[in-house]
């Protein structure tokens, strides 16, 4: 009964369904609640099996053990119960539906060894075979001893002397016939007698064979050298398991058992969200697990079709670099004329773990396909698991490749497999972590800039990407105006489908036959220059990790640091509480929270300093993860007095989602700018909810006096359409207005002029739809919360605010804000920044000098010369008494300067 539980699990049935089946067949008392059966009977079995396999030497062969025990049960049952009753039990209790299989099981009625024919060396029907064998043996023409490898190719016979005797007699019969065929001149009478003896022996053996169990027949059958080696490797991997797969909810069940909003196992979330994985393979006890993350309705429809057996699906195999790639092809929908949805599963044959997993997959012949759906802003929904049978030819090729790889990697030292797997790849862990972050954080709009190709599919992809942005822009207008056209969702889904499909076709077209996309050709080149350290911050199982990339002599080097004393789960709650507080709360709750949160970041900042030593690197590029992307990491303290921060340790501290995006921006073809600066300013007040503020117009006036070539759009002239039309002509774009976040990140943006909020908003989606910024070196978004977001998704994407749209459309760098800023702070920051820019400073130098000015309260001592003097004079002309209010604001929030961050290439 317990192997029945394990066998049902291989079919992906849930514990509750397995328990209900046991109750319905009378194997457990019908009065016991199903939840109790699932908890106290089914789950303990599943835990044990997933950790160590089933309890026999072939721990991976769940179905084999179950079949063996059922055969033995039938043999034990038949002597004391009528054959019809046992047949009924096989169908009603054990649920065997195949009549031929039931008949085979019922053949256990009699002892199989009662039908064992005699050894032809000792006895034969006519005596001819016995006499002939004695003659051949005495003349040295035939051997009675077994070959030296007889037992080695039948290792299972060592503990079965009864079966050993069967195999020995079978060998003597075959040896006698083969020897007789070599001897010439035998009389017809002798040959006739031999044939009678052989036929009689064969007839008796044919009576015995059906009474042997399938397992016993397998033990007698000789194994090839590869088969023996493969089983030896699998036995050496017994008990190999991963801690993250131990929890009860680590694997999904059949989709009938999955509730619509069921949570996804944590390890799957880690792979899909943190690592950017869409298709992945693992091994959980006897189960080869394939993970597939689907994103569009077309994908989902294919999955639903797949889960309605019998459905045709395809499995393809191809060589891939140093490994083997198995393609699972979902069924094609009748109305879909595009290529079918395919999921790749790649096994590297230079890694012991992958080769061993491939061998295991090929041996059991099935994969447990677990499907999750990626929806919204990085949320996962469980779909379910199904069993996928692999074709015999696929299993044969995979087994051959796996065994060949294991012979090369471990040789005869198969006992070291578990140890090799445990320590394998430690020297590559840092690079793997860094590259998985590049994949995960490089998704969505950033791919559009990083991808490049000269094939026709690239143009189709970019057209589809722009169209999706345009549809999102229309939907954002409707959301902001609290309207929702009835066909909007359908149009949005269709546009998302089109973009995803064109991306798949682009990847296939640029695959060059080995599945490697053309735009990844530069991935093996240095990701950063020799003066830069690029740091990915990773949320790995609730703990912060730092994956650092640096370059020396044209080669990339990686480090991986785990911050054990910095758990991210409680920090996530604290950051969420902080963001819900109002900055103007009378009890300074918001400010106190901020100071505590920044203080907590001191540990990771110190770890960054120790890994990316400032004496070796001038520039630090940070790519944070949730919830750290909402905090000013550049202000993290390096000493208890908080006088030294991360921004002080390097010449430059900037943010970027990926090194790949930085490389793409650096390689992009830049256009000449027609004007030096474009200022877009709007003070609001023209729409409900947008109070009038004076800062933006003041900024526009101040900036106009600090540059020689300036275009200014203010108030009714500052419409989103006109702003987007003029931005491509400028080298520096400065926008001062109300900044508004939104739960839908495509509707977040800057409030300019318009007849409604939707019409007035320069949204992220609008920028993606119509923006072209290859002439823009710097975008300044001097408004509230332009560098933050309201998203609750766990996606690792670090830039979900409007700044990301400017980068994706070609801007080199963006200055944005992490929280609400006052009018005065905005004016002073803009004046000092543009004074330095107007004096010829580059983007980062101007930013760094401005931050230093604000942080050190340099306005308290008026400057007598240089850019700062020009900035203060410009502010004095507009706001004569500005220094004292700024003092008060700095006292209320000493970290006000940290709200400003710079992202991109500077």
Image (cartoon, grey):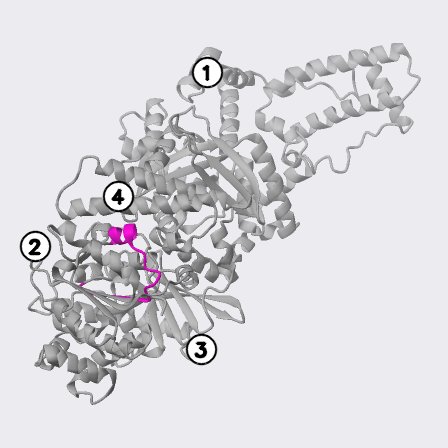
Numbered tag placed on residue 528 in the rendering: none
* First reached walking from the N terminus: tag 1 or tag 4: 1
Numbered tag placed on residue 471 in the rendering: 4
Q: CA distance from mark 2 to mark 3?
A: 52 Å
What is the crowding at mark 2: few (fewer than 14 residues within 10 Å), some, or many (at least 20)?
some
**Camera-side residue: 465 or 407?**
465
Numbered tag placed on residue 616 in the rendering: 3
What is the crowding at mark 4: few (fewer than 14 residues within 10 Å), some, or many (at least 20)?
many
Q: CA distance from mark 2 to mark 4?
A: 24 Å
Q: Do the numbered discs 1 and 4 sit on residues whose CB atoms are within 8 Å?
A: no
Task: Give residue 634's quadrant in the image.
Answer: bottom left
Residue assigned mark 1: 86
Q: CA distance from mark 4 to mark 3?
A: 47 Å
* Picture mark count: 4
Q: Do the numbered discs 2 and 4 sit on residues whose CB atoms are within 8 Å?
A: no
Numbered tag placed on residue 687 in the rendering: 2
């Amino acid at each position: 009964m317990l192997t029945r539980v394990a066998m049902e699990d291989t079919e992906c049935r849930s514990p509750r369904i397995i328990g209900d089946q046991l109750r319905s067949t009378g194997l457990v008392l019908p009065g016991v609640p199903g939840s109790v059966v699932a908890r106290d009977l089914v789950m303990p079995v599943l835990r044990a099996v997933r950790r160590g396999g089933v309890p026999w030497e072939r721990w991976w062969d769940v179905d084999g053990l179950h079949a063996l025990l059922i055969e033995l049960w039938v043999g034990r049952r038949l002597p004391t119960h009528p054959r019809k009753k046992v047949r009924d039990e096989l169908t009603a209790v054990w649920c065997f539906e195949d009549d031929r299989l039931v008949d085979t099981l019922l053949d256990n009625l009699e002892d199989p060894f009662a039908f064992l024919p005699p050894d032809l060396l000792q006895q034969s029907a006519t005596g001819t075979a016995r006499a002939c064998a004695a003659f051949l043996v005495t003349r040295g023409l035939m051997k009675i001893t077994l070959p030296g490898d007889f037992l080695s190719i039948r290792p299972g016979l060592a503990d079965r002397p009864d079966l050993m005797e069967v195999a020995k007699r079978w060998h003597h019969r075959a040896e006698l016939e083969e020897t007789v065929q070599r001897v010439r001149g035998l009389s017809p009478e002798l040959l006739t007698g031999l044939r009678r003896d052989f036929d009689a022996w064969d007839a008796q053996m044919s009576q015995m064979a059906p009474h042997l169990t399938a397992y016993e027949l397998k033990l007698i059958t000789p194994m090839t050298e590869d088969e023996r080696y493969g089983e030896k490797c699998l036995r050496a991997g017994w008990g190999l398991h991963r801690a993250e797969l131990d929890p009860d909810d680590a694997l999904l069940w059949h989709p009938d058992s999955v509730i619509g909003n069921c949570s996804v196992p944590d390890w799957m979330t880690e792979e899909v969200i943190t690592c950017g994985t869409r298709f992945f393979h693992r091994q959980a006890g006897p189960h080869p697990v394939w993970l597939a993350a689907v994103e569009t309705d077309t994908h989902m429809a294919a999955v639903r079709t797949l889960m309605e057996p019998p459905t045709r699906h395809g499995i393809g195999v191809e060589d891939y670099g140093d490994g083997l790639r198995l393609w699972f092809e979902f069924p094609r929908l009748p109305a879909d004329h595009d290529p079918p949805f395919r999921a790749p599963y790649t096994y590297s044959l230079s890694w012991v773990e992958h080769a061993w997993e491939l061998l295991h997959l090929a041996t059991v012949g099935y994969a447990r396909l677990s499907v999750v759906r990626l929806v919204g802003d990085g949320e996962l929904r469980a779909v379910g698991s199904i069993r996928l049978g692999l074709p015999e030819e696929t299993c044969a090729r995979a087994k051959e490749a796996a065994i060949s790889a294991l012979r090369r990697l471990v040789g005869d030292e198969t006992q070291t497999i578990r140890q090799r797997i445990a320590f394998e790849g430690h020297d590559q862990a840092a690079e793997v972590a860094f590259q998985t972050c590049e994949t995960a954080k490089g998704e969505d709009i950033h791919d559009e800039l990083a991808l490049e190709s000269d094939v026709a599919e690239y143009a189709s992809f970019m057209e589809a990407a722009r169209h999706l942005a345009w549809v999102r822009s229309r939907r954002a207008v409707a959301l902001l105006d609290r309207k929702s056209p009835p066909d909007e969702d359908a149009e949005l889904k269709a546009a998302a489908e089109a973009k995803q499909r064109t991306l798949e076709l682009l990847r296939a077209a640029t695959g060059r036959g080995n599945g490697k996309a053309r735009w990844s050709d530069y991935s093996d080149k240095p990701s950063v220059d020799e003066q830069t350290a690029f740091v990915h911050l990773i949320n790995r199982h609730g703990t912060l990790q730092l994956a650092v990339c640096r370059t020396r002599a044209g080669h990339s080097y990686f480090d991986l640091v785990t911050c054990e004393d910095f758990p991210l789960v409680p920090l996530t709650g604290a950051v969420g509480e902080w963001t819900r507080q109002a900055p103007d709360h009378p009890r300074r709750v918001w400010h106190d929270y901020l100071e505590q949160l920044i203080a907590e970041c001191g540990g990771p900042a110190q770890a960054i300093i120790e890994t990316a030593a400032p004496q070796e690197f001038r520039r630090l590029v940070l790519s944070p993860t949730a919830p750290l992307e909402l905090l000013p990491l550049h202000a993290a303290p390096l000493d208890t007095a908080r006088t030294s921060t991360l921004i002080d340790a390097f010449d430059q501290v900037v943010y970027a989602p990926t090194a790949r995006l930085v490389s793409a921006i650096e390689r992009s073809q830049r256009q000449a700018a027609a004007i030096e600066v474009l200022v877009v300013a709007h003070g609001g007040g023209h729409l409900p909810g947008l109070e009038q503020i004076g800062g933006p117009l003041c900024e526009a006036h101040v900036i106009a006096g600090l540059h020689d070539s300036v275009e200014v759009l203010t108030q009714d002239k500052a419409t989103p359409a006109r702003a987007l039309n003029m931005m491509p002509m400028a080298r520096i774009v400065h926008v001062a207005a109300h900044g508004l976040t939104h739960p839908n990140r495509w509707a977040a943006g800057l409030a300019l002029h318009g007849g409604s909020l939707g019409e007035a908003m320069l949204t992220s989606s609008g920028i993606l739809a119509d923006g072209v910024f290859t002439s823009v070196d710097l975008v300044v978004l001097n408004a509230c919360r332009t560098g933050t977001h309201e998203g609750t998704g766990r996606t690792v994407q670090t830039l979900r605010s409007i700044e990301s749209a400017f980068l994706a459309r070609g801007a080199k760098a963006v200055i944005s804000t992490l929280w609400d800023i006052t009018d005065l702070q905005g004016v002073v920051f803009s004046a000092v920044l543009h004074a330095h820019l107007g004096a010829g400073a580059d983007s980062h130098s101007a930013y760094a000098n401005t931050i230093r000015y604000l942080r050190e309260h340099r306005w308290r001592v008026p400057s007598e010369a240089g850019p700062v003097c020009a900035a203060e004079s410009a502010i004095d002309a507009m706001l004569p008494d500005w220094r004292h209010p700024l003092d008060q604001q700095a006292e209320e929030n000493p970290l006000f300067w940290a709200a400003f961050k710079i992202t991109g290439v500077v």
